[in-house]
Image (cartoon, helix red, strand yellow):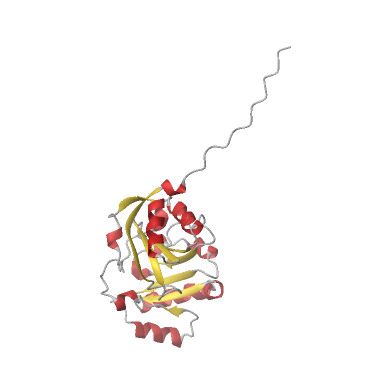
């Protein structure tokens, strides 16, 4: 009889992956006042990532489509720490286009930051850390991108998240109103209706919301009222 083969030694665990070494393309990092979401008005460290998979008609951040610099997650976290801001927003562009965003989120959370992410709604949010606040755009027809909405993302929204509709006109409002009612969104999460800045005046949108007794929050981009609407880094 042949000798039995020796039992294999148990595999040794490999070195832990260094999340701080992950490289992400970043458009800008800055410290300002949060202009949107339920946290509007709070001092915030913004990390804007490069690239976007959508081209909304009213987009105000086209500068993030291509321009950016490669930065390691550790360097980004260090920059955020220098601002001494407990609240951090990761935005874009579309931050979910870069797989490394999850390492960035993990390191920011590990550093004790309160982390939010703003996503255009066209990519799957399932992999996001449940501790992160999600600000999820639902693209109305006026954006030209309504066919890119991933409706399953709405089912993952938590009570502390926000879903945002950017409203260009009455048709967008009626479309968004139907989505909110049909999906009972206001019962499950925060709902924001935001007029296209410079396109739809806030007053008619406010009056439509009041007339319909709609359980949503009117959102103005308050940073655009504090500083010039096209000013970068705010």
Q: Position of residue 48 (x, y in %)?
A: 35, 60
With respect to residue 219, does 132 lie above or below? above
Q: Is residue 189 left or right of residue 201?
A: right
Residue most extreme to the right:
1
Residue at the image position 55 percent from the left and 70 percent from the top: 159
- Quadrant position of residue 120: bottom left
Q: Using the image as rendered, state which of residue 179 and residue 129 is in the foreground.
A: 129
With respect to residue 227, does 117 lie above or below? above
With respect to residue 78, does 202 lie above or below? below
Residue 199 appears in the figure: no
- Quadrant position of residue 119: bottom left
Residue at the image position 67 percent from the left and 19 percent from the top: 5
Q: Position of residue 88 (x, y in %)?
A: 43, 64
Residue 84 appears in the figure: yes
Q: Position of residue 38 (x, y in %)?
A: 46, 74
Q: Position of residue 215 (x, y in %)?
A: 50, 80
Residue at the image position 37 percent from the left and 58 percent from the top: 79
Look at the image and tell me in which quarter the N terminus lies: top right
Look at the image and tell me in which quarter the C terminus lies: bottom left
Q: Is residue 150 left or right of residue 24?
A: right
Residue at the image position 37 percent from the left and 78 percent from the top: 220
């Amino acid at each position: 009889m042949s000798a039995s083969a020796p039992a294999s030694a148990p595999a040794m665990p490999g070195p832990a992956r260094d999340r701080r070494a992950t490289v992400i393309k970043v458009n800008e990092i800055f410290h300002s006042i949060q202009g949107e979401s339920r946290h509007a008005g709070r001092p915030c460290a913004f990390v804007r990532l490069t690239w976007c998979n959508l081209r909304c008609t009213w987009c105000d951040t086209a500068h993030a489509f291509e321009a950016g610099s490669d930065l390691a997650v550790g360097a980004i976290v260090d920059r955020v720490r220098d601002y001494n801001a407990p609240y951090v927003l990761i935005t874009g562009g579309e931050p979910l286009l870069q797989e490394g965003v999850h390492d960035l989120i993990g390191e920011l959370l590990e550093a004790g930051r309160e982390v939010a992410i703003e996503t255009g709604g066209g990519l799957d949010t399932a992999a996001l850390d449940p501790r992160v606040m999600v600000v999820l755009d639902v693209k109305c027809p006026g954006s030209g991108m309504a066919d890119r909405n991933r409706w399953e993302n709405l089912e993952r929204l938590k009570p502390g998240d926000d879903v945002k509709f950017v409203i260009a006109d009455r048709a967008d409002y009626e479309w968004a109103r139907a989505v909110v009612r049909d999906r009972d969104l206001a019962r499950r999460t925060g709902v924001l209706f935001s007029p296209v800045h410079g396109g739809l005046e806030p007053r008619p949108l406010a009056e439509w919301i009041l007339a319909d007794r709609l359980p949503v929050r009117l959102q103005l981009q308050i940073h655009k009222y504090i500083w010039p609407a096209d000013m970068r880094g705010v």
